[in-house]
Amino acid sequence: MDKKLGTRYAERVEGFRKYVQKNDIATALLMTDVKGDRSLRPSEQKLHKDYYLRIVEQSRDGIIIRGAKAHASWAPCSNELIILPCRAMKEEDKEYAIACAVPPNTDGIIMVQPERPVNFKEPNSWLDYPISSGDYSPDAVVVFNNVFVPNERVFMKEEWQLSGDLVHMFANFHRLMANIGKYAEIELLVGAAILAAEYNGLEKVSHIRNKIAWLMYYAEGLGALSQLACINCLFETETKLAYPNPMYTNMVKFMYADNFHQALKYVQDIAGGLLSTAPSSEDFLNSETGPLLEKYLRGKSEIPTEKRFKIMKLIADLSNVHKQVGAIHAEGSLQSQLLSIYALGDFEKYKAAAKRAGGIKDDKLHPVFSQLPDYPIR
Amino acid sequence: MDKKLGTRYAERVEGFRKYVQKNDIATALLMTDVKGDRSLRPSEQKLHKDYYLRIVEQSRDGIIIRGAKAHASWAPCSNELIILPCRAMKEEDKEYAIACAVPPNTDGIIMVQPERPVNFKEPNSWLDYPISSGDYSPDAVVVFNNVFVPNERVFMKEEWQLSGDLVHMFANFHRLMANIGKYAEIELLVGAAILAAEYNGLEKVSHIRNKIAWLMYYAEGLGALSQLACINCLFETETKLAYPNPMYTNMVKFMYADNFHQALKYVQDIAGGLLSTAPSSEDFLNSETGPLLEKYLRGKSEIPTEKRFKIMKLIADLSNVHKQVGAIHAEGSLQSQLLSIYALGDFEKYKAAAKRAGGIKDDKLHPVFSQLPDYPIR
Amino acid sequence: MDKKLGTRYAERVEGFRKYVQKNDIATALLMTDVKGDRSLRPSEQKLHKDYYLRIVEQSRDGIIIRGAKAHASWAPCSNELIILPCRAMKEEDKEYAIACAVPPNTDGIIMVQPERPVNFKEPNSWLDYPISSGDYSPDAVVVFNNVFVPNERVFMKEEWQLSGDLVHMFANFHRLMANIGKYAEIELLVGAAILAAEYNGLEKVSHIRNKIAWLMYYAEGLGALSQLACINCLFETETKLAYPNPMYTNMVKFMYADNFHQALKYVQDIAGGLLSTAPSSEDFLNSETGPLLEKYLRGKSEIPTEKRFKIMKLIADLSNVHKQVGAIHAEGSLQSQLLSIYALGDFEKYKAAAKRAGGIKDDKLHPVFSQLPDYPIR
Amino acid sequence: MDKKLGTRYAERVEGFRKYVQKNDIATALLMTDVKGDRSLRPSEQKLHKDYYLRIVEQSRDGIIIRGAKAHASWAPCSNELIILPCRAMKEEDKEYAIACAVPPNTDGIIMVQPERPVNFKEPNSWLDYPISSGDYSPDAVVVFNNVFVPNERVFMKEEWQLSGDLVHMFANFHRLMANIGKYAEIELLVGAAILAAEYNGLEKVSHIRNKIAWLMYYAEGLGALSQLACINCLFETETKLAYPNPMYTNMVKFMYADNFHQALKYVQDIAGGLLSTAPSSEDFLNSETGPLLEKYLRGKSEIPTEKRFKIMKLIADLSNVHKQVGAIHAEGSLQSQLLSIYALGDFEKYKAAAKRAGGIKDDKLHPVFSQLPDYPIR
């Protein structure tokens, strides 16, 4: 894909890569523009031109960019912001076709972080919020208010034709990397369901076993598709770069997102109403209420109340809105996975299989099916 | 059902009812015991005997009770706690068959509230948490540590045979009342989905319209079943008390709980990643970052950014864990709805229909199907 | 809607209605055109102009029509064919806007029936195919090859503006009538599931009870929505004609179609593999194999093998392709229900609910929500 | 597992295997007993003792067996019937623990085939039933009415302890082999959906593309799990026999069965009502009706009507009850997959993951998680 890019910018990209490696630089990737009216392309937006990051001025030394990137995970803690376009472009959008690297303390950059869901400075916040007190990615909105980028840090400029390929290749890696992590997340969700069932004394109940089995199927399905995306990797034609199998990476993301809410529903169903009404750790640690809660909130007699309390808090915290929205939208929405799967599908193979079975003769020969005999024997 | 209860306690219940009405008393209903090991009945629990509220002593003047009730909505703000058993009992559980009324400031009562999800005293908390800053029900764990209840406030005592009927009759009302409220909740969720689609400029996208149509189907389905539960109400044999149709009340609760997570998934899918990464109101009201967010976080050009911000915060807040767990567990879990539907089903009618169609002759005559001719004509 | 139609044709329609009543005439309704390329409107079709039934010639006495109607249930057994358009039309489609009545033996009418799924003349076909041997609607393709229709039988001609309203009003009745019948169909499917569970000795298994409870919920949900479509009926403005509530009629059709395949899956899961591999009635009635099958294919010892055999055949026959396709496509596909629900939804009510909860002030006052106080107390 | 079996019978099994190979013998595997009341074990059945195949007599030369096996695919066309038990046994069931080989023409064997769904001798049956006219497996009920089996053909006898292992090991191979075939089946179903959309002129419609993408996800998911079952195969401890990964083989069967009905629903939705109402090939080949059907049943103008006709018949035939029941019950029902997945799940791994995240300290060290640092940093 990137012949042109290669020819013009390969040296800069390579140089930047070495600099990052050598200096142990923390990078953050900024992709998703704020987008404005989502039914309009970058150049069609009405109120102003800056809903997608764009080049507002060019000089001999570099470019000046303006716009804002959303969902910029880890940007506030990074040494370098890597900027990529977030969609395929047409010629009229060419000022929006921009890839470059900028240090976060450059003039004109303003970052606005979302509110941290939990006050992690409170000493026992991790007891009540075991996930969100520690596992917090600061997903800032990053505003570029006329920011200068010198030429040596510009990797793509106005090459609108390359924009779509760049996005797809990025997605191949991103969807896989993110979803290998999702396996670990669902693994612990399955474990939480198993422990909640045990601690409640419900581990032999048929519908609960079925729900746990389904959760295992979900977890191991993510693991299986992630593995296959690596095993069946492809190679980029010109650079010989190995990349994850795009069909399987999209499938694993789709499987994750399409089933996450159902997984929460099952886990919550197993754990019970204490997920919502259990007192906080403060009351457990309090000398007056603590012993009462210890006595009354125990489930199975062999299990200390503290363990049951912790598993309730874990499941409640895994049910937070950030997990849900991340499941749906991180690395692209459900609809974008379906579009990708549709785009990647081997239509000719599927059609050849159906034509053979239906006795539909066709001139187009498919390499696999043209060698097979007629469907059963007629 | 309550002939015996009627004979022995009717006067007390009626007297209490008049006292509540006359004095505009706020009552809270305490039903769910903490339950301990859920595979064991009240009298089978191992570590101690108090996992279900029970009578520990009886005197001429009254009884002393011990135990704890969970999920006691509004108990901390009430004038009277009404106590009911939470399950059918066997004879060996008879000390657990107890219904009575106790003022919350009685000696020996300790209430532990769960942490309020939002600091509602912050001036703009409602902007960031429009639902949970206001719509908060303090669902305490209420501990009864040897609490004396005088005879005139005891409505049921050791009549373990009545316990199951009492629970089912309560459920009929509770499942309906709660779910009429759920219609209003889902109504606003549908509205939030419609507005999010409009504000994002996505209101003409086919898959989004389908999701909105499905949300309407869900909302109006809840409305329809709630209506029919009233229209097709039944009458208690002895007291002539009208009560909601149990089949439809269970169906509306099941429909609500079985689809709530999917509804959230659809609404989140429509609204986008800003649900998780939008800055807080503090940043919107800040003089430096406010204008930047106003510029960049607008969607459709005609819609002020503030409206889009508010709808994002509304949907994020509707996705909180308390809503999800409430959907599953309030008024009984998914499994308890299925068991109720199974118990209420008119098996003889269904079987008669299948036997007629399958040509299975039977001696048992069903009032409807025995009058019909043979299935089609043979 | 039909003022114009009323003015011009009311007399003819009324005359035809009386003739039908007086003479006990069997009518068949022909609506769905064969449609050709479904992405093109009637007047846009490429290969020929007759994919939608149209007027090819007009004279003083009547019109000549050409085209073909598909899925014409009962047409071969009727005395009169009632023709309606199947979609909204634009002006350029006006030759396709046609409603009239034609006797089936008129010159130029050719009917082609689909193959009858079962040879119902075989003496025991009903044992093996209890449903399709008797419950068979001959859904012909009816070709109109230049058929003359005299003026007094023409009810609409070129009034393309009325076409959409006619279709929607027809759908209101049709979707309800068809789906009241679906309640009876699912009622017997539930009965078949209950009996299969009993006859197999599986009636106490938890996952099977859950599936039966879900089937009851499905059946009674169809019943509930059908009832409400009648109870909450609407009245056509000009004629005062009562008609089923369109939202509920579309919802009942959607609920039926969206869940039918899952219902089959559950029933098949309960019944077991004999659905597919049970011998035919011929082998049961055979003197050599009969006693062996009687011995070996019994399930629960109390139940004669014959009953189990009949319930297997019933369920297998209910799983035929015609039932499945009828569920999806009769009275409009899943997508057409979703579009109807979307079109019928009370957007302003939903939006007002969300705006109130989200604190979004608006000028448009909604009659219900404008009278309510602010959402909780702020 | 089969040390004992190995010691006692290995020679016979090996001898039989060589005989099969050398003589190109067609074998049929008979596993599922007719089972009677499914809530009772083999030895608990009431009416008679023969619901599971059993040894009724033993002599020096061999054994006499009685009982019946159901769903015996290809038995009527085989040279040898291989008999296995179908479940784990207890000591009291030991007469039912039997594995052996018998030629189908042995005295006392009676086979009863189900009715062939299609009269395949009609010259054009394949046009109307492209799948079931050719792809027909004769799944007989095979009755063993006191059949003598000489010792050299008995591979297991009364070793009830081995029965469960034998069944599970068989299932590992069977579930995989069967489901690799299912990939090919769903591949052609996807192709049929694609062609139906094209031939109807609907290939650009958003909801149809989404359904096709989902079908691809389903097909490729089956392919992925089948691949991984081979790649991650395991080795039997004593014999070093490689066998498919049991977790993945169960997952692929579950994925296939759990989604098959939804796949049919989607394909039928895309194809349209002609699936049910299209005339038969006889009418297409008829000189009077043929040209009319050719004219009117064309979809997209570029596609000959014949192709559209064939794809409709293909999809209708793929929707037959045998495919549905095969999906659910062949190689074990949905519930048996869930039980297998539950049994195979690595509970300690899942629990260790949840304990780490929830801060629950435990003595049991898990090899992976005990090496990891605490969950995030606290």
Image (spheres, coloured by chain):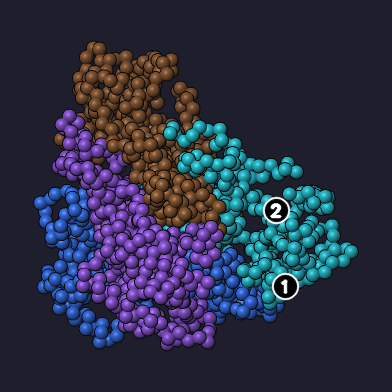
Chain colours: A purple, B brown, C cyan, D blue
Left of B165 or right of it: where is C124?
Answer: right
Image coordinates for residue D267, horizontal then vertical, percent = 50, 66
Q: How many numbered dots are placed on residues in this image?
A: 2
Relative to residue C294, is residue D159 drawn left or right?
Answer: left
- Locate residue D288: give its quadrant: bottom right
Q: Is residue B261 visible?
A: no
Circle 1 residue:
C49
Q: Which mark is residue C165?
A: 2
User: Where is residue C84 shown, x and y percent of the image?
Assistant: 72, 59
Foreground residue among D53 and A241: A241
Q: Residues within 10 Å of mark 1 (few under 14, many from 20)?
A: some
Q: Residue at 52% across / 80% down in the picture?
A: A359
Q: Is A312 located above or below residue C339 in the figure?
A: above
Residue B238 visible within the image: yes
Q: Is residue B24 left or right of residue B152?
A: right
Q: Nearer the viewer, residue B357 or A32?
A: A32
Residue D341, x across and y down, in percent: 27, 60
Q: Amino acid at mark 1?
A: Lys
Secondary element type, mark 1:
loop
